[in-house]
Image (cartoon, rainbow, N blue to C red):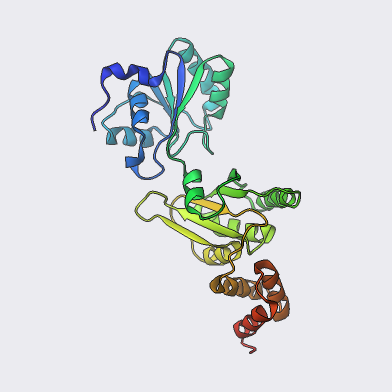
Amino acid sequence: MHPPPDDAKGAAGPPGTLTLVATPIGNLGDMPARGLAVLAASDAVLCEDTRVTAKLAARHGLAPSLVALHEHNEEAMIPRLLARLAAGERLALVSDAGTPLVSDPGYRLVRAAIAAGHRVTAVPGPSAALAALAVSGLPPAPFLFLGFLPPKAGARRARIGELARLEAAGLAATLVLFEAPQRLGALLADLAAGLGEARPAAVARELTKLFEEVARDSLGALAVRYASETPRGEIVVVVGPAGGPVAADDASVQRLLDAALARGLGVRDAAAEVAAATGRPRREVYARALRASGRE
């Protein structure tokens, strides 16, 4: 693809404009056409990792001036960038993937630019959170984006406990979270323990890429699966709202039973828990539990 013509300068907005540009979350072909025009017309492109953005730009025949802006230098960079905006420069802001500021740096710069009276605009486009929500099969609205929960177990469980209390007080929203592959199993186990094993959920990974996968099941079943399986790639977890429909098909009931028995519950208690969670008849679930325990 050839770069936009020189007269595309207006694509980046009037002088002193900061434009947030969404970039692909995996498939480089998803780059918005207007976003390319903005990158080509900007005086500088602010990016998390200049190597990542340089690769994207080269893919589309561009060679913009790149400036690193990440969580470690954002505060120090703000005065310099505000000065460039005040001098009439057009700046673009991108993250390594997806929509800027969504669990990525840039919020402090945006707030400072607005406070200084500069124009801030955006080129919308790819978002891993919205893509996962759309393909999860779970209610799309309302939803609550939580980004990454704390990586340490104690803080993560405390945050989940806060969510559970909010839900007890009436919150009913689909939850969208990011997680690192190596922590996925622990996150799902904590979500299942804190929000309920029968809550419907989805784990989306490698969205828009060759090995895209969306696993849809209950939190309990997904926790069991990923306890022994560490997936590769970028991960988005979507959890259905409190009080919503549960995954109560035969396979899900069996997985919930297996998980309850593995936790040390007796047959009767395991059957009661799963029956209450899924709405399946208690006698039916008890019979399944007997077979699963080998006591039938």
Answer with the quarter of the image where residue 276 lies.
bottom right
Quarter-wise, where is residue 117 in the image? Answer: top right
Q: Which residue is more in the foreground, 260 or 278? A: 278
Task: Answer above or below: position of 194 versus 91.
Answer: below
Q: Quadrant of residue 38?
A: top left
Residue 282 in percent (x, y) is at 69, 77
Q: Is residue 273 above or below residue 210?
A: below
- The residue lying furthest to the bottom in this view is 296
| 178 to 114, vertically: above or below | below
Q: Which residue is rendered at x = 59% and y = 60% of the image?
A: 200
Pinpoint residue 93: horizontal percent, then vertical percent.
Answer: 45, 27
Q: Quadrant of the C terminus?
A: bottom right
Q: Is residue 181 visible?
A: yes
Q: Position of residue 224 (x, y in %)?
A: 56, 67
Q: Residue furthest top?
A: 87
Quadrant where the image shows the N terminus: top left
Is residue 178 shown left or right of residue 68? right
The number of callouts visible is: 0
Residue at (36% x, 21% y) in the render: 11
Question: Residue placed at 26% from the left, 21% from the top?
Answer: 5
Q: Is residue 231 visible?
A: no
Find residue 126 and report its horizontal and vertical position in percent.
Answer: 43, 40
